[in-house]
Amino acid sequence: MDEQKIQSIVNSVLRELGEKKIEVGQITSLPHPAKAPRPSITAPPPAAPTGQSSDAVTATDSDGGLEDLSLDKFVHWNGIRDAKHADINDDMIGQTAARVCQGRAGSRPRTLSLLRFVADHSRSKDTVVKEISPEWLTEHDIWEVQTRVADKAEYLTRPDLGRLLSDEGKKIVMERCEQSPQVQVVISDGLSTDAVTNNYDEILPPLVKGLESAGFKVGTPFFLRYGRVKAQDEIGKMLQAEVNLLLIGERPGLGQSESLSCYCIYKPTEDTVESDRMVISNIHDHGTPPVEAAAVIVDLARKMLEQKASGLNLKR
Ligand code: B12
């Protein structure tokens, strides 16, 4: 991947979106005054290691209630008492949001460590079962169609239904979408609602702008509720799109539950197999930043259109 090319796509897209001060070589992200605080359990690593002595940090606030366990002091918490080389532990803790240096109480985890684990787990489950509200879609000026799945419970138990559009959905797509675009972009909740709501502003507009400024005919983007990856094949075929890009919420992990993937395929047909597909994963603020991902995807779309291929058939 040519870093300079990606950088220049990022910068030209940001400029078009109104970002004024872009330094050469700087990969930046869009300012988000209106963005709600993220309910993230994973905080960025601090500039200097801040592993705090295990006994200096408690999980109760001044009213005796439980504090937000996503706070930096809990994510970068040093649970080892009387460590021989506390500075080495601090250094390690400062470099990762992974659960290192948690210490133990006898053979068991320490209470704070266990609480954070349970909080992370709850958040991961939450993002799978939450819904994107119709109000959120209206605010973001994007309309929706649904797969053959009726609700979240069915989504989890019937992946096959999430790979096909409902009859109503097909009708709406055919009515509202431009036919035969070079690139069709779809965004779907998949397995993480937070992945869509946290990354949308920084990925969808830059991606569409980037594709347009690269000179491609871009189809009408829409939101697919209860989608699975293979749904992009049916959509691609229906709209006769050359390149189909599906931004979809990834299965959450413990500590990272807002990660988005972009699955990419060139002209899907009945004979499409998985090796025809590609994925750019781990798109979120602490992974591949969404704006940077948008630039990488534009570059990939260009290659797919040039070579008329994707997956193993694409030379990268
Ligand atoms: C679950 C999962 C799987 C499951 C998928 C089964 C299922 N029904 O969900 C299994 C174990 C089968 C799997 C296999 C593979 N996976 Co996988 N997988 C994941 C994981 C953990 C989550 C994916 C997800 O949330 N998808 C979203 C939901 C909504 O999609 P879905 O429709 O329910 O399921 C489809 C996708 O998951 C897709 N898929 C899963 N993995 C991959 C990988 C590639 C390259 C492609 C094109 C598609 C794909 O196949 C499923 C069926 O259509 C991601 C990690 C991540 N952070 O995203 C890695 C990840 C996507 N997988 C990866 C890889 C490398 C593979 C394999 C190539 C491993 C191998 N050497 O065999 C295979 C390829 C499978 C394929 N479809 O082509 C890498 C891709 C790296 C990259 N950027 O190219 C990831 C990012 C993990 C990683 N960090 O390395 N995977």
Image: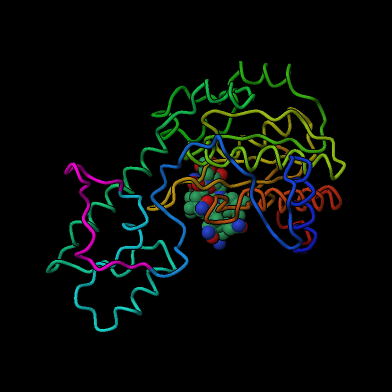
Is 308 inside the magenta-drawn segment?
Answer: no
Instruction: Check the picture and name the quadrant holding the C terminus.
Output: bottom right
Q: Is residue 102 above or below residue 122?
A: below
Q: Position of residue 124 (x, y in %)?
A: 38, 44
Q: Residue furthest bottom?
A: 84
- The quarter holding residue 313 reads bottom right
Q: Residue at x 39, y 73 (%)?
A: 92
Q: Is residue 91 above or below residue 68?
A: below
Q: Nearer the viewer, residue 224 or 110?
A: 110
Q: Position of residue 297 (x, y in %)?
A: 71, 50
Q: Residue at x 74, y 58 (%)?
A: 23
Is 59 inside the magenta-drawn segment?
Answer: yes
Q: Nearer the viewer, residue 63 or 263?
A: 63
Q: Position of residue 196 (x, y in %)?
A: 54, 37
Q: Residue at x 24, y 58 (%)?
A: 113
Q: Nearer the viewer, residue 271 or 253?
A: 253
Q: Residue at x 48, y 45 (%)?
A: 258
Identify the coloring.
rainbow
Q: Position of residue 111 (x, y in %)?
A: 18, 57
Q: Which residues are magenta?
A: 50-68
Left of 63 or right of it: where is 258?
Answer: right
- The quarter holding residue 209 reads top right
